[in-house]
Each structure stands twice: as C-alpha cells, then as structure tokens.
Amino acid sequence: EDKVVQSPLSLVVHEGDTVTLNCSYEVTNFRSLLWYKQEKKAPTFLFMLTSSGIEKKSGRLSSILDKKELFSILNITATQTGDSAIYLCAVLEYGNKLVFGAGTILRVKS
Amino acid sequence: KAGVTQTPRYLIKTRGQQVTLSCSPISGHRSVSWYQQTPGQGLQFLFEYFSETQRNKGNFPGRFSGRQFSNSRSEMNVSTLELGDSALYLCASSDDRTNTGELFFGEGSRLTVL
C-alpha cells in the first residue's frame, strides 16, 4: 500500500530557530513530491520536487528530494510565528492523485 | 483569476441523509479532485475527474460518488450519511496543459453529521 510518512509529528521551536521536516515515501507510481502549508483553511502550495538533488528555495524555506532513498526534507530558517502551521508532504501519482502524509504540526513561540 | 470555489462552506446533516457538495475549479483547469480530511485519517483521496470522466478513485465506499460537468465544475455526493463522514471535504483543481502537477485547493466544505 502506498504511504507517506512525516516526522516529527509535531514540534515547538522559538523564533529564529531553524527546523527540518522529514518526509519518506513508498509509492508505486511516483510523479513528483509536493509540500503544502495548512493553517486554518485550505493547504497552500509551497514546493513541487521532481528531480533528485535539486534544491528549491523560496525565501527562508527550502526543500530537496532524494529519489534513491525515497525521502525529502523541508527546511525553514529564521523561523517566525507566522510559520506556525501544519506542513503536509504529499506524493503525486499519475492521475493527479495525491497521497498525503499525516503532517507535521509546527508551533513557533515568540 | 478566481481561485477554487467550494459550496457550501459549512453544513450539518443527520445520519441517513445525503449531501451534495459543489466545486468550481480555476478557470481553464479541467482536472478536479476531491479529498476528505479528518483528524484521525488526515487527507485522503476520494476521486479525480478530467473532462467529465472519472480518471482515478480512492478507497472509499460506493456511498461516495461524484461527477463533472462540461464546464469543469464538479459535484460530489455522499448518500446514507454516517457519523464518520464528518470531515472537511477539499476540492483541488489543476491545469493538465502545463504538466506541473501543482494542485490548487479550495477552502473546503465542512460537513458535520449528527
């Protein structure tokens, strides 16, 4: 059965800290890996990763994919309280089916 | 460009009733997929429609069904509601022409079954 596992399930950090969120996967029809941020509403898109070893960056956030070891990491540097959210990792299969992990709940304390 | 629009945003039903949820994708997007989000199971794929055809289906019972219209708007229906169907139902659209795979989510319809 296809699965996506995220760790840690939750963490609390202080503003300014750097965090690393992990995502491993076992999926049959891998197309790409996506990271989403979910606050109180719908998930919002952060990154899509298709190729191994190519880092994607957006401001303080960055992510990389390792297709050999079947995992991805999401880094957030200089965290802010506005980064508090659930971070979802999902693998996109063919047919536009997303297989989601359970998410990592991040809380950034001021 | 307007985003993905879902209606209704909130609804309350009782066991045994049925419900229909609606999703209007981003203009030009022909792929619409549906997800159920619950605290216990997280986000789970229900089904995906493209050009009025169901392309992919998740592991949900037959009480869950959907359809897509020629204007790409989609509806999903849940019949004989059970307490466990209480969830946030999210719709996502994507533009298959760009082949980026990026899905854009609506705000969701929060269903409570009493």
Image (cartoon, coloured by chain):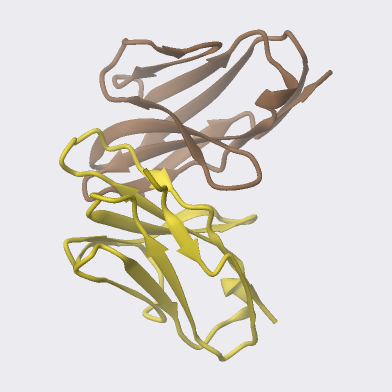
Q: Residue at x 53, y 24 (%)?
A: A22
Residue reaching furthest bottom?
A: B16
Q: Residue at x 27, y 48 (%)?
A: A96
Q: Colour of chain B?
A: yellow
User: Which picture quadrant has residue B111?
Assistant: bottom right
Viewport quadrant of the C terminus of chain B: bottom right
Q: Is residue B95 left or right of residue A73?
A: left
Q: Position of residue A65 (x, y in %)?
A: 36, 19
Q: How many marks?
A: 0
Residue A94 can be seen in this image: yes
Q: Position of residue B70 (x, y in %)?
A: 19, 68
Nearer-the-camera pick, A61 or A25: A61
User: Which picture quadrant has residue A34?
Assistant: top left
Residue reaching furthest right?
A: A110
Residue A27 can be seen in this image: no
Q: Is residue B105 above or below residue A76?
A: below
Viewport quadrant of the N terminus of chain B: top left
Q: Colour of chain A?
A: brown
Q: Residue at x 55, y 90 (%)?
A: B17
Residue reaching furthest front?
A: B1
Q: Is residue B62 left or right of residue B112?
A: left
Q: Is residue A72 above or below residue A104?
A: above
Q: Residue at x 46, y 55 (%)?
A: B44
User: Which picture quadrant has residue B104?
Assistant: top left
Q: Is residue A9 above or below residue B26?
A: above
Q: Position of residue B52 (x, y in %)?
A: 19, 67
Nearer-the-camera pick, A24 or A103: A103
Nearer-the-camera pick, A51 or A77: A77
